[in-house]
Image (cartoon, rainbow, N blue to C red):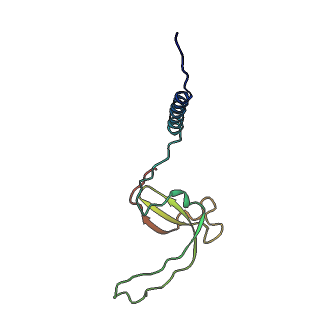
């Protein structure tokens, strides 16, 4: 006569193994389906172009000079100007955003009034 012994401890161990395997497969699937995060490997001194939108206020200030220049001094400030930025391939231009004499150039105010030019080292996309 054959006797079948059904041990509850064997069933518990088997159920634990199956549950653990299912949990590992579900966790691996959830990790694999996550969105890829952009990796930013850009160094310091980087500025996004979208901050140069709208009008800004600009004032030039002398921070250093040659000894022979007698008419200027360190700390001398120019007048306050309202500007808009224009980004070109090699330069960042500060253009006057208003007309000095109203009605002189209604088509493009401030287009010919470059107040400052800053060099752009390079452009790149992130």
Q: Nearer the viewer, residue 9 or 87?
A: 9
71 on left or right of 26: left
Q: Residue furthest bottom?
A: 70
| Residue pictured at 48% horizontal, 61% vertical | 47
**Quarter-wise, where is residue 118 in the image?**
bottom left
Q: Identify whether 16 is placed above or below 105.
A: above
Q: Identify whether 1 is placed above or below 31.
A: above
Q: Nearer the viewer, residue 91 or 31?
A: 31
Residue 74, how many percent across, how many down?
Answer: 43, 86
107 on left or right of 32: right
Q: Identify whether 36 is placed above or below 117.
A: above
Residue 10, how many percent across, how many down?
Answer: 52, 28
Residue 26, how many percent across, how many down?
Answer: 54, 34
Residue 64, how many percent across, how many down?
Answer: 39, 82
| Residue pictured at 62% horizontal, 58% vertical | 107
Q: Residue furthest top?
A: 1
């Amino acid at each position: 006569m054959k006797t079948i012994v059904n041990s509850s401890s064997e069933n518990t161990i088997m159920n634990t193994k199956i549950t653990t395997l299912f949990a590992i497969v579900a966790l691996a699937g959830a990790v694999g389906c996550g969105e890829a995060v952009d990796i930013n490997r850009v160094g310091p001194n980087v500025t996004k172009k979208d901050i140069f939108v709208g009008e800004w206020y600009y004032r030039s200030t002398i921070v250093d000079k040659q000894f022979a220049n007698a008419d200027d001094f360190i700390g001398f400030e120019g007048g306050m100007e309202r500007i808009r930025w224009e980004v070109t391939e090699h330069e960042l231009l500060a253009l006057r955003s208003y007309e000095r004499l109203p009605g002189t150039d209604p088509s493009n105010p401030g287009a010919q009034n470059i107040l400052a030019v800053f060099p752009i080292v390079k452009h790149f996309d992130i």
